[in-house]
Image: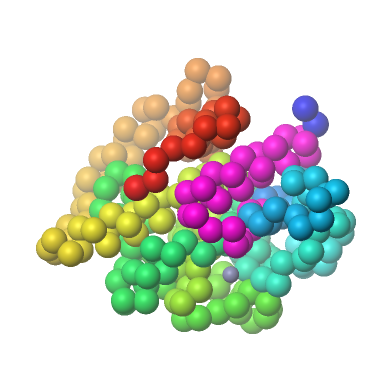
């Protein structure tokens, strides 16, 4: 499969995972193109034109100028442009509206690493005031507040996640929403106890031990969860959501 077709296939899988997992059709997945000079973007929302293929993508240069594509353009393009500009290690950016994570943020609560599945969120996911990616300055502000983190919550709006790969970014979005649901449940029962930095450090050693799988893919770049959910999507199966 050509690199660009492979990327489109991965984007369609990420869209299927997130549309189901977040129970929401708003948002987009994006990834740097194979040559690194542009990025491609796919809506979570299917095309309204029945003649347009569901995997239609838009391609942008790294300044946010449209290069190609027939889909309706997203309003919030600067939420993609600025994280790519700010960090060379970012290979994928996703912006969605995970409702349980938004609910936590509305109550002034933070998304903390409370279990092994949320360890990527380090001490806490940063929270930005309301921003909208239609405006350049809001995209810039979002990238600034995201910093070196892999996720940012935007008050009253949604989330931006990044990854070195699209697979990583997709699973980061899944974990963000699931962690928010866990905190909403656990927070009603008592005080939250996030993982200590000592535990997270020890678990990183486990991650290093199993860093490659039998196909030679790095497990941090292509998380095991991605391969599991990808296999379900390809079989047309769904899974139970928390
Ligand atoms: Zn949005």
Residue furthest to the top: 214
Relative depth, front residue between 67 and 25:
25
The answer to whether residue 84 is above or below residue 215 is: below
* Residue at x-position 39% and y-position 33%: 208
Q: Position of residue 55 (x, y in %)?
A: 75, 45
Residue furthest to the front: 50
- The question of residue 84 being in magenta is answered with no
| 144 horizontally vs 29: left or right | left
Ligand 1 is found in the corner quadrant, namely bottom right
Q: How is the image coloured?
A: rainbow
The answer to whether residue 62 is above or below residue 199 is: below
| 195 horizontally vs 75: left or right | left
The answer to whether residue 215 is above or below residue 181 is: above
Q: Position of residue 5 (x, y in %)?
A: 77, 36
Q: Quadrant of residue 13?
A: top right
Magenta region, residue range: 3-30
């Amino acid at each position: 499969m050509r690199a660009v077709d492979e990327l489109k296939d991965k984007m369609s899988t990420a869209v299927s995972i997130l549309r189901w997992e977040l129970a929401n059709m708003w948002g987009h997945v994006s990834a740097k193109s194979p040559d690194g000079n542009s990025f491609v973007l796919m809506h979570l929302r299917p095309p309204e034109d029945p003649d347009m293929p569901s995997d239609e993508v838009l391609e942008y240069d790294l300044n946010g100028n449209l290069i190609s594509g027939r889909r309706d353009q997203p309003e919030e393009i600067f939420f993609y442009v600025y994280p790519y500009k700010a960090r060379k290690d970012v290979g994928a950016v996703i912006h969605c509206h995970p409702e349980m994570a938004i609910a936590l943020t509305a109550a002034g609560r933070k998304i903390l690493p409370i279990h092994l599945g949320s360890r990527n969120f380090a001490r806490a996911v940063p929270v930005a005031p309301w921003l909208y990616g239609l405006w350049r300055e809001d995209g810039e502000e979002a990238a600034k507040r995201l910093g070196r983190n892999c996720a940012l919550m935007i008050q009253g709006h949604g989330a931006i996640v990044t990854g070195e790969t699209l697979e990583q970014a997709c699973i980061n979005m899944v974990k963000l929403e699931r962690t928010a649901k866990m905190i909403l449940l656990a927070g009603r029962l008592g005080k939250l106890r996030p993982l200590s930095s000592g535990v997270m450090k020890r678990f990183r050693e486990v991650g290093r031990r199993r860093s490659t799988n039998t196909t030679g893919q790095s497990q941090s770049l292509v998380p095991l969860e991605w391969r599991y959910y990808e296999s379900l999507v390809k079989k047309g199966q769904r899974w139970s959501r928390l």
